[in-house]
Image (spheres, rainbow, N blue to C red):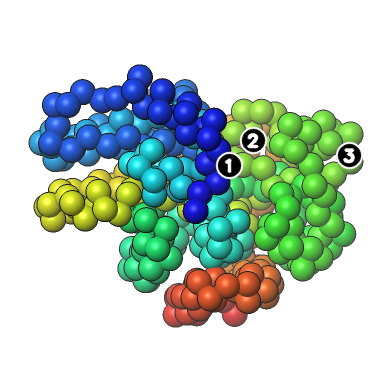
Amino acid sequence: MTNLTRRTLMAATALMALAAPALSADYTFRFQSSDPAGNPNFMLQQGWAKDVAEKSDGKIEINLMPVESIVAHNETQDAIATGILDGHVTDLSYFSGKDPAFGLMGNPVGAWSNPEQMLDFVENGGGSELLNEIMNPYGLQFIGATTPGLEALVSAVPLDGVDDLQGVKIRAPEGLVQSVFAAAGASPVNLPGSEVFTSLDKKVIDAADYTVFSTNQAQGLNDIAPHPVYPGFHSMPLVEISMNKDKWDALPEDLQQVMTQSVKDFARVQVAALAEADEKAVAAAKESGEITVHDWSDEERAKFRGIAMGEWEKVASQSPAAQKVYDALTAYLTEKGLVE
């Protein structure tokens, strides 16, 4: 039922004792993040935990721990189901090995042009209900979603639309990201993130799916690849906040509402904070006079999304749940006029 090893379970038990929260609140929960301590995302998540305590008048206390504190980043789902953890804040696509539906929902490459589209799908387009339909059998309750934002694309060559991707050697992680870029005519290259800078500098690759603009800028990637695409058009992870379903069901309805609203508020705070960092970095890049920022038109974004949908369809055929995700995504995008 679980892929947690006996050694992991023993280590988790010891760490749980050390990390046990004070018994001052009516409900105390132990959550694990997929981000390390000190990471800007983790610091924002700590703010969310504090906000839950305040909104619940101290009735709920969330002890949020950084990645790998209790179990590995891709073991938190099992740990929640078995009671080792109470909840997590994590990238949904880490669990695509359990069901491809998690990967398709977690990062449907090419689907979103901004975070608001994804959050609207989750909150108003049936995404939340669909996620609970998929997660409940695994013993989890989906509370809400956030995201670090739409990743920029690092590029050493000008890219103003789908046609410009033809033959471009682009670093992309294995799986759906590579499949979509290949379908769009690019030549995906499998490289670890640690080799992106050197590979761009030595012209081993022309472009890279890496991370958000502000981080790319801080690491000097835009200096050696001076044609970034911002806002990006490809990758934006759905970060889920979920918890043990039995413990969720035991919460009074008013506290469930507090938890749900807190995640909605947190998502807006995180998106705004990281967008501000990106905007400052974009302004600095433009002022340098040596970096040209490319922003794809709505038509080109829709064209790429249409190509991506063909790859989503292949994932959809891999499980009934993945098919439901595909149907919900395409229905939403069609209704909103986001696909041609």
Give the distance between the C-alpha atoms of the residues marked 3 and 2, in whole angstroms. Answer: 17 Å
Residues tagged 3 and 1 counted as in contact (Cβ below 8 A): no
Compared to residue 61, the image places residue 327 above or below, namely below
Disc on the earlier residue, 3 or 1: 3
Residue 138 in sight from this viewpoint:
yes
Q: Determine whether the residue tagged by mark 3 lies in a helix, strand or loop.
A: loop
Residue 122 in sight from this viewpoint:
no
Looking at this view, is 108 or 207 the one in front?
Answer: 108
Compared to residue 109, the image places residue 60 above or below, namely above
What amino acid type should be assigned to the residue bearing mark 1? Val
Instruction: Residue under label 3, please give it.
Output: 203
Instruction: Residue under label 1, please give it.
Output: 212
Q: Residues within 10 Å of mark 2 (few under 14, many from 20)?
A: many
Q: Determine whether the residue tagged by mark 2 lies in a helix, strand or loop.
A: helix
Could you say which quadrant of the image residue 303 lies in? bottom right
Instruction: Residue under label 2, please give it.
Output: 216
Residue at x-position 74% and y-position 63%: 179
Q: Position of residue 140 (x, y in %)?
A: 36, 54
Q: Position of residue 264 (x, y in %)?
A: 30, 51
Looking at this view, is 141 or 266 the one in front?
Answer: 141
Residues tagged 2 and 1 counted as in contact (Cβ below 8 A): yes
Q: Position of residue 262 (x, y in %)?
A: 25, 46
